[in-house]
Image (tube, rainbow, N blue to C red):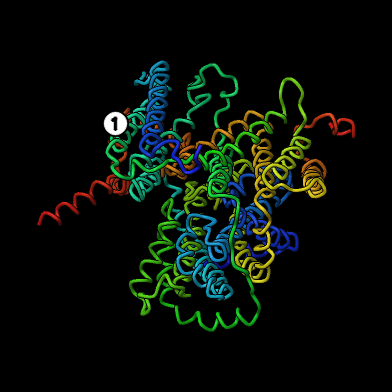
Amino acid sequence: MQEIQSLMGGFAVAMSWFNLALMVAGVSLGVLIGVLPGLGGANGVAILLPLTFTMSQQPGGATSAIILLSCIYWGALFGGAITSILFNIPGEPWSVATTFDGYPLAQQGRAGAALTAAFTSSFIGALVAVILITFISPVIARFALKFGPPEFFSVYLLTFSAFVGMAKGTPFKTIAAMMSGFALAAVGIDTVTGQLRLTFEIPELLKGFDFLIAVIGLFGIGEILLTIEEGLEFKGTKAKLNMRVVLETWKELPRYWKTSIRSSAVGCMMGIVPGGATPASFMAYGLAKKMSRDGEDFGTGKVEGVVAPETAAHAAGTSALLPMLTLGVPGSPTAAVLLGGLLIWGLQPGPLLFAEKPDFVWGLIASMYLGNIVGLIVVLTCVPLFAAILRVPFSIIAPVILVICAIGAYTVHNSMFDVWLMIAFGLLGYVFKKLDYPMAPLVLALVLGDRAEDAFRQSMLGSQGSLGVFFSNPLVGIITGASLLLLFWPLISKGIAIARGGR
Amino acid sequence: MEDNKPVASVRVAEVVMAALFLAFGALVMWDSRRLGAAWADDGPQAGYFPFYIGLFIVVSSVANIFRALNLGEKGRQAFVEWGQLRMVLLVMVPTVVYVALIANPLYSLGIYLASAVFIAFFMWHLGKYSWTKIAPVSLGVVVFFFLMFEVWFKVPLPKGPIEAALGFR
């Protein structure tokens, strides 16, 4: 049980007053970000990333910085439920399924019960995922130490194939968005030959596109534009949450243990695969609806209908950090931003991180346990406060958020060009959202583009240009095979449907 | 102009967007060809990987254009209505002016003063607030950001004449 020992060491790192204070601050800020339109986990963390530069320079500072940022993430995950239940506005895509039963509950005056159920099941989902991370990630990291360029490229391929295979709409939009991300990542100086690529003699393009700018623009400005299109009013129900309601709901929750276990399992499985949180929440809701005794009444305000998607979404959101830590392949835009943070602080995510920086890794994992406990306490006690923020009129909130986005974009590289770029990405995000182009593949391709290309080129060099290298041993062959299966899944499933229909 | 009249249909928007992707993909391919997208003696050339990326963009855009042309009923729906577009522009235009005010070749206000003006304009134009409410909110937010970035976190942001007069550079 070496993991338990390492984890205890991690708790020793994470359990300082300073770090605990950071957790409270991070979670509160995260909930605030999750509640506000236009600010979510991904761009919230992206905007705050530059503020951690100085913090990470001190000894042990990188751990404190990641604790702050990951707690913002937990907070944002919790915060999404508040807007879904009280205002019927899903703050994040994976909270959409929470509105199905959460909002009807709130309309019946049971907002407190719905919120308590949402927060508690989020907590349980996260806890299951963190336990998974604790015990599985060292194994994967040890395993991945043997990875060479072909193995890494096949993992990247798997990541991106998963987006295509699990796309809601047409796979071609996913491919177009993703490949554009790769193309934007290629802009600038080629690391191998030193040649200028896609710069067209524009000096600003020399250093390439930073994905943090893309995240702030796509998710921030784009979201604000979509919100304002719907008009200026938020209509919500009042939130009352007192100890009595919380305890009553907690008495009710153990009844849904089967749903919790099922949803956690779905969440963890889907979370490791990129883009998993949103499908996981829908899948868990669908499964619960099918298997529960009152499945028929789902959608009219059932607590179980809140438990299922929230558990799965939080489990998925948390386990998305597993591939980021062990392989350096983020599973979600927010995980990608956290990965960007690690790189900026001079830490190389991936298998070596576990061997070289055990303090950092186990401090982070321990902080996941603590952060979620802190998060649960913060959200249960402060809901009315956060809900009140949504009652601040849009004509005040919107410009303040736009100012925050502009400052965030500027501080990434101290460049005004980036602020203009952010606006361009904002317009792109607005059109993307309206036409159902997915944004997550673009962001992840922008993050991983250079490394995927390096892995590809090194593999090709090793094999003298033969693609056979991606099937040269059982390990890489299985990963590549799985990627291809996922990549062509839209075609395969169509084929199956036709074959069935033909019979 | 009637507010719920469509500016463009979903079909038109889909085709335009896919065509833009197509152009982008073609541009990527063209530039990669310039760099050399083949296999040199010492391995793949600089344009090798991006060339195929561009090819993927082009192929998927063509598929998207065909899909958009066969959308049927959904394609005739409104992509954006005039009323919606007006609201979007109501946010977009001031934001562009705001960023231009922060730093430009003629007279830069710096991010703090520009932000105060921006928030005040929004509250006045969209919110119809009185100046007794606008002034404390816009100035308060900006002073908070100033303290947070310049004083506590020591992250320098673009500054203008007022900050210079106060001795911050």
Left or right, B143 with respect to B10, comes to: right
Disc 1 marks a residue whose amino acid type is Ser
Counting labels gives 1
At mark 1, the secondary structure is loop
Which quadrant would residue B22 be assigned to in this image? top left
User: How far across and how far down the image is residue A111, in percent?
Assistant: 57, 72
Q: Quadrant of the C terminus of chain A?
A: bottom left
Task: Give coordinates of residue A112: x percent, y percent.
Answer: 59, 74
- Badge 1 local density, few (<14 within 10 Å), some, or many (20+)? few
Among all residues in the image, which is located at the extreme left?
A503
Q: Residue at x 67, y 68 (%)?
A: A384
Farthest residue to the front: give it: B1
The structure residue drawn at horizontal position 28% and vertical position 42%, both measured from the top left corner, is B72
**A409, above or below B32, in the image:** below
Left or right relative to A381: residue A126 = left
Q: Residue at x 37, y 34 (%)?
A: B12
Residue nearer the viewer, A453 or A270? A270
Q: Position of residue A82 (x, y in %)?
A: 58, 64
Q: Foreground: B164 or A274?
A: B164
**Residue A112 visible in this rendered orientation of the protein:** yes
The residue that mark 1 highlights is A466
Instruction: Please report, as a chain letter, where disc 1 is located.
Output: A
The answer to whether residue A3 is seen in the rendering is no
Left/right placement of residue B10 relative to residue B156 reads: left
